[in-house]
Image: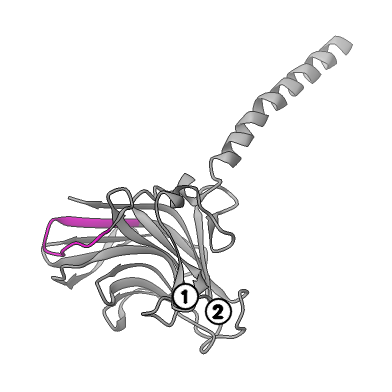
Amino acid sequence: MIAMRVMLSVLTTAAALTATPAATAVAASCSHPADVLDLSNWKETLPTGSDGSPTEITQPDLATYSVDPWFTTNSSCDGVQFRAAVDGVTTSGSGYPRSELREMTDNGSTTASWSATDGTHTMTIDEAITNLPADKPQVVAGQIHNSSDDVTVFRLDGSNLYITNGDTTDYKLVTDSYKLGTRFEAKFVVKDGEINAYYNGTLETTIENSDDDLYFKAGAYTQANCDKSSPCDDSNYGQVVIYGLTHAAS
């Protein structure tokens, strides 16, 4: 009996020692968002920096960059958290803060710019919107942009998830019962002058577009600021977790 207990103790200790390196490897594998998502052809805009000039992180720095809580891995190491508080810094062309990726090319060295009539351009986001700002509970969680404005986006307003068309923010209601934290797939496929928008694999709408200067964006673009939402501090924010992100041109 004593010999059996000794053997069990040895086996238990050996198992624990064997498990420890694996646990350490998992923790080390998600030190930065680029350990979870392929960010080789993206740049990140943060809700920090100076007025009208937010912090931007490009490659190769993006490969080893994170900043809590604005752009970091989640606790389970399977997603990237994007957070933008209402008091965050905004770009010169917007009144709202963002923690958002912008499509790039050439391993992140060149800003992407493509035509809706040339080839096929696809972005797929596996994501969940996890927090909305107070008073104006709106967050954009993926978009197609042109040289001056958004063309179409996935936008949550309370529990209503919309696909927009230019300034028509309620163009296509995807669901009126979205619950924060619910994981979903948002997808844009652009070809032959048309933008096809899919939600969880279902085509929701087709938007005519022939712009020549398009690019994808993904993350949390909070549609509120200190003039429209209270409290005016970093406890009041929009947040998106992205579990998978791909974009391709063919």
Q: Nearer the viewer, residue 215 or 18?
A: 215
Upstream in sequence: badge 1 or badge 2? 2
Q: Which residue corresponds to the image point at 60% horizontal and 41% vertical from the top-left?
A: 27
Q: Are marks 1 and 2 in contact (CB under 8 Å)?
A: yes
Residue 22 seen by the camera: yes
* Mark 2 secondary-structure assignment: loop
Q: Which residues are magenta?
A: 111-124
Q: Relative to residue 125, is residue 15 drawn left or right?
A: right
Q: Amino acid at mark 1?
A: Pro
Residue 105 is situated, as x and y percent measured from the top left of the image, at 27, 53
Instruction: Give yes or no for residue 92 being in the magenta stretch.
Output: no
Disc marking residue 87 = 2
| Mark 1: secondary structure | loop
Of the numbered discs in the image, which one, if any, rests on residue 74?
none
Front-most of residues 15 and 210: 210
**Which residue was labeled with disc 1?**
97
Residue lying furthest top: 3
Snapshot quadrant of residue 216: bottom left
Q: CA distance from mark 1 to mark 2?
A: 8 Å
Q: Residues within 10 Å of mark 2 (few under 14, many from 20)?
A: many
Q: Position of residue 69 (x, y in %)?
A: 58, 62
Q: Quick check: 53 above or below 182?
A: below
Q: Residue at x 16, y 71 (%)?
A: 211
Badge 1, how many Cα within 10 Å: few under 14, some, many 20+? many
